[in-house]
Amino acid sequence: MRTPVNVVYSLSRNLYPWLKPSITSLLEHNRDAKIFVLAEDDELPFEIPCEHEILNMSGQQIFPPAGPNMRSEFTYMAMLRVCTPELIQAERVIQLDVDTIVCDSLAPIWETDLDGKWLAWAPEILGRYKPFGREYYNFGVAVLNLRQLREDRAPEYMVKALNCIQLRFLDQDTMNMFALPDKTVDLPIRYNECFCCGQTDNPAIVHFAGYPDWMTNRAMPRREYLDRYLDP
């Protein structure tokens, strides 16, 4: 019997209403998914119609208020994604940004061979941002080998970095900093179709990365994928 797909989202309160289309699309194509949500409350303002667990992170003390990244345009909820291996006691999980629409089964990437690897993710082949002098990867869709990350103490090192160094894209920069090529597997672009990773004819995940107003932007590419899952 195939193991149900674990999926994790991390989001602050202002993004709660925008999570529903992503979850609705996910469950349409992955009915046996179990969803974890790192949130700022014990409940969300809508029902999640599947097995799920909400982890209230509002009292977190991992990232202190005076930390170098606490005044970023992003919040500590983004930084907490590097702590997922310690927060979720599972072998692996698929991490999704809130601004994603799932269009197909995630079983193919769920079954990615990650023996000895940290994660599978897609390279930003169209992006120019390469702060570490090598290929840069998008962390908005990733298959995480939580067991290996825990064994290699990766969360410990990444938390220290975020508490010492000011970074532009917080969790994504940190993972790119520490995840050397021999610890990663490339995901096919169809599982993270976005402006920086590329476009395909048959996307499995449409990711509206780079569009902060994606819920209201009528001119946004691939808008029709989002419209299918918005409440009338």
Image: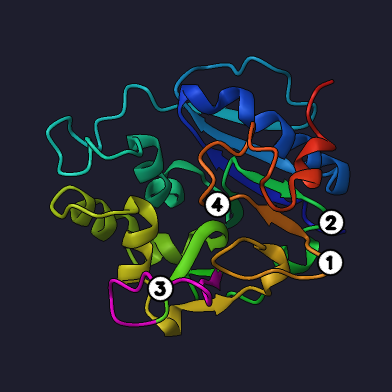
Q: Quadrant of residue 134?
A: bottom left
- Residue at x-position 70% and y-position 53%: 221
The residue wearing badge 4 is: 209
The stretch drawn in magenta includes residue 130: yes
Q: Quadrant of residue 98?
A: top right
In what element is the residue under mark 1? loop
Q: In the rendered view, does 165 fall on the left or right side of 92?
A: left
In what element is the residue under mark 2? loop
Labels 3 and 2: the sequence-earlier one: 2
Kindly report the distance in space between the C-alpha atoms of the residues bearing marks 1 and 4. 18 Å
The residue wearing badge 2 is: 104
The residue wearing badge 3 is: 128
Kindly report the distance in space between the C-alpha atoms of the residues bearing marks 1 and 2. 9 Å
Could you say where residue 124 lies in the image, as x and y percent from the top left? 51, 71
Instruction: Judge the density around disc 4: few (<14), some (14-19), many (≥20) Cα neighbours within 10 Å.
Output: some
Q: Are marks 1 and 2 in contact (CB under 8 Å)?
A: yes
Query: Which segment is the magenta one?
Result: 122-134
Q: Decide which of 129, 54 is in the foreground and name it.
A: 129
Q: In the rendered view, does 218 fall on the left or right side of 69?
A: right
Labels 1 and 4: the sequence-earlier one: 1
Kindly report the distance in space between the C-alpha atoms of the residues bearing marks 3 and 4. 15 Å
- The three-letter amino acid code for the residue at tag 4 is Ala
- How many numbered circles does the render carry? 4
Where is 217 relative to 190, above or below?
above
Could you say where residue 114 lies in the image, as x and y percent from the top left? 58, 74
Any mark on residue 45, and which? none
Q: Is residue 115 visible?
A: no
